[in-house]
Image (tube, rainbow, N blue to C red):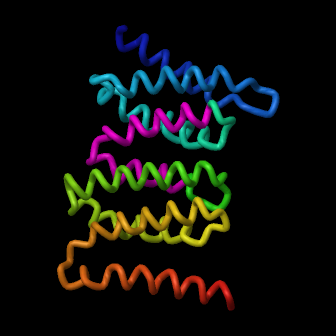
């Protein structure tokens, strides 16, 4: 398959994946997501990774809140992508995940975004802990916002993600206090909600 054919296939996927509603059958979206999972799994996917991140990743995240078959296919695509996504792309990919962690997002998309963020951060801790450390100022506020979500699955996923993010603390003087700081953040926020 030549690159122009693949580019056209990706464009077709965007078109099908963005058309949805109560009366729109889920099968075409699930099929396109399954095809996309096959493309992501290929060795030469790195050529198309920037296009995927910019145009398809936000759609895949939104499809996590779709019908069960579509959500399952979207999860397969996300799992495949975040298992091999370029580490250096993290500062550009994280805001796309944060967009699905807002109060307006559906809870299934929030959980998906948090789980994929956690996988991605876990890989970064192993490969480039300093990158995670440099990204903490953008990570902490985004993750902290979901720690108190009314949906327990979201709050639990946020708790796991904040623990992983804190592995990016590289200041040896602060490392002993990271666990305590996270607990106090959670306590302070729960008390402020009571007021």
* 154 falls in the magenta region: no
Observer-nearest of 13 and 8: 13
Question: Residue 33: horizontal and vertical position, in percent?
Answer: 54, 26
> Residue at left 25%, top 83%?
176
Quadrant, the N terminus: top left
Query: Relative to 179, is 100 above or below?
Result: above
Question: Residue 25: horizontal and vertical position, in percent?
Answer: 74, 24
Please state if 129 lies on the left or on the right of 23 as rendered. Answer: left
Question: Residue 84: horizontal and vertical position, in percent?
Answer: 31, 38
State the extent of the magenta-drawn residues as a range: 70-99
Query: Relative to 177, is 50 above or below?
Result: above
The quarter holding residue 192 reads bottom right
Quadrant, the C terminus: bottom right
Question: Residue 87: horizontal and vertical position, in percent?
Answer: 27, 47
Query: Relative to 16, is 94 above or below?
Result: below
> Residue at left 44%, top 63%?
160
Please state if 193 lies on the left or on the right of 97 as rendered. Answer: right
Please state if 163 lies on the left or on the right of 13 as rendered. Answer: left
Please state if 37 lies on the left or on the right of 153 as rendered. Answer: left
Observer-nearest of 16 and 189: 189
Query: What secondary structure predominates along the stretch shown in magenta?
Result: helix
The single residue placed furthest to the right in the displayed view is 23
């Amino acid at each position: 398959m030549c690159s122009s054919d693949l580019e056209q296939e990706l464009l077709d996927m965007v078109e099908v994946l963005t058309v949805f509603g109560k009366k729109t059958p889920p099968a075409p979206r699930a099929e396109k997501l399954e095809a996309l999972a096959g493309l992501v799994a290929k060795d030469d996917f790195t050529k198309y990774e920037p296009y995927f991140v910019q145009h398809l990743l936000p759609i895949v995240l939104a499809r996590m809140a779709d019908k069960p078959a579509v959500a399952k296919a979207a999860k397969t695509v996300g799992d495949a992508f975040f298992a091999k996504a370029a580490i250096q792309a993290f500062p550009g990919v994280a805001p796309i995940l944060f967009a699905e962690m807002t109060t307006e997002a559906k809870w299934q998309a929030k959980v998906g975004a948090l789980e994929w963020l956690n996988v991605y951060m876990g890989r970064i801790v192993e490969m480039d802990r300093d990158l995670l450390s440099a990204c903490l100022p953008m990570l902490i506020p985004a993750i902290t916002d979901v720690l108190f979500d009314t949906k327990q699955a979201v709050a639990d996923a946020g708790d796991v993600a904040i623990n992983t993010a804190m592995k990016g603390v590289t200041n040896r003087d602060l490392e002993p206090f990271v666990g305590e700081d996270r607990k106090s953040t959670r306590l302070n926020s729960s008390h402020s909600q009571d007021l």
